[in-house]
Image (cartoon, grey):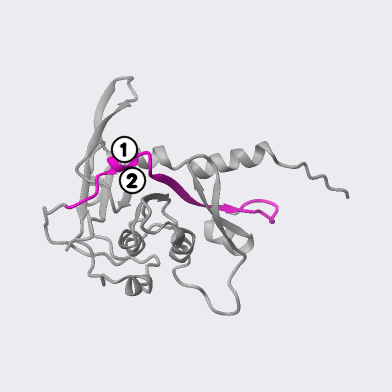
Amino acid sequence: MLFEDLPSDDESLSSIDDTDDDETYVPEPNNNILVMESDLESDENVEILNIEENVTYILPSPQKNRSSNRRKNPTIETLADKHGYLWNFDVYTGKSGDTTEKNLSARVVKNLSAPLQNKNYFLYFDNYFTSYPLITYLKLNGIYACGTVNMTRKHLPKFKDDKLFKQGDYDWRIDQFSTSIIRWKDKRMVSLLSNFHDPRNTENVQRRAKDGTVSTIPCPKVLKDYNQNMNCVDKLDQNKKSCQIDRKSHK
């Protein structure tokens, strides 16, 4: 097993603390790969959805820190499909009482995606939501999921130093749940977690150097799929603007 040892039942996985931490796990080599090919997305019967965060700003100007925005402004977590239609949403207005909720981002994803279980859905989200326990939990409940991930999260394997990667280099690990983590170097490092991609699949992309020369480098297919499918909430925002009602204020 390549990731930190986790229980295999849904109830235990849902209780795991996956808040940010510096803990890492050094994996043993493993070449056994049993993954669901991402070509399933070409099936006409599948649905691709995104979960993203929208902040309604009450302050005079947005704060640079994302957690500060959440504390001071109402936040709407939205689940939308590739046509820009809203499927579900969750409104966060701040903590209730004196207790601080742990694993808030994972709880939001689990609540919004509960009706999607075991129905051939593909779910994409960014690194605010992505964690290893969450991706594994979704796989065990029949939801294909993929997202960028912050490498300071818990339960992630240790890779070589970022400085040792050259443009086009990539590395990956996979566990017994077919959850894979892929790291790729473009101008900067990109890290993704997926529970259905084969981390060995790559495609060629072109990059232009400062002197104008063009080179071809390998790029993991998981990154291409992520970039192509992370626009559902953007389409939702476009749909909202096309039928938005003017609001006038009086001093």
Callout 1, which amino acid?
Asp
Residue beneath label 1, please? Answer: 186
Give the farthest residue toward the bottom: 98
Q: Position of residue 197 (x, y in %)?
A: 27, 47
From this view, report whether residue 224 is shown above or below residue 197: above
Residue 190 lies in quadrant: top left
Vertical placement of 208 versus 242: above or below?
Answer: above
User: Residue 65: which numbered mark, if any?
Assistant: none
- Determine the CA span between mark 1 and mark 2: 8 Å
Q: Secondary structure at mark 1?
A: loop
Does the rendering let one see residue 198? Answer: yes
Q: Which residues are magenta?
A: 34-62
Residue 92, image x, y percentages: 59, 63
Residue 37 in magenta?
yes
Q: Nearer the viewer, residue 219 or 83?
A: 83
Does the rendering let one see residue 64?
no
Magenta region includes residue 230: no
Residue 3 in the image: state x and y as whole percent: 22, 63
Q: Which residue is mark 2?
A: 190
Circle 2: residue type: Val
Q: In this rendering, would 72 be left or right of 100?
A: right
Contact between labelled residues 2 and 1, with CB atoms less than 8 Å apart: yes
Which corner quadrant holds the N terminus?
A: bottom left
Does residue 86 appear to the left or right of 123 in the view shown? right
Secondary structure beneath dot 2 equals strand
Toward the top, the furthest residue is 212
Residue 191, x across and y down, in percent? 32, 49
101 relative to 206, above or below: below
Residue 152 appears left or right of 241: left
Residue 157: quadrant of the picture: bottom left
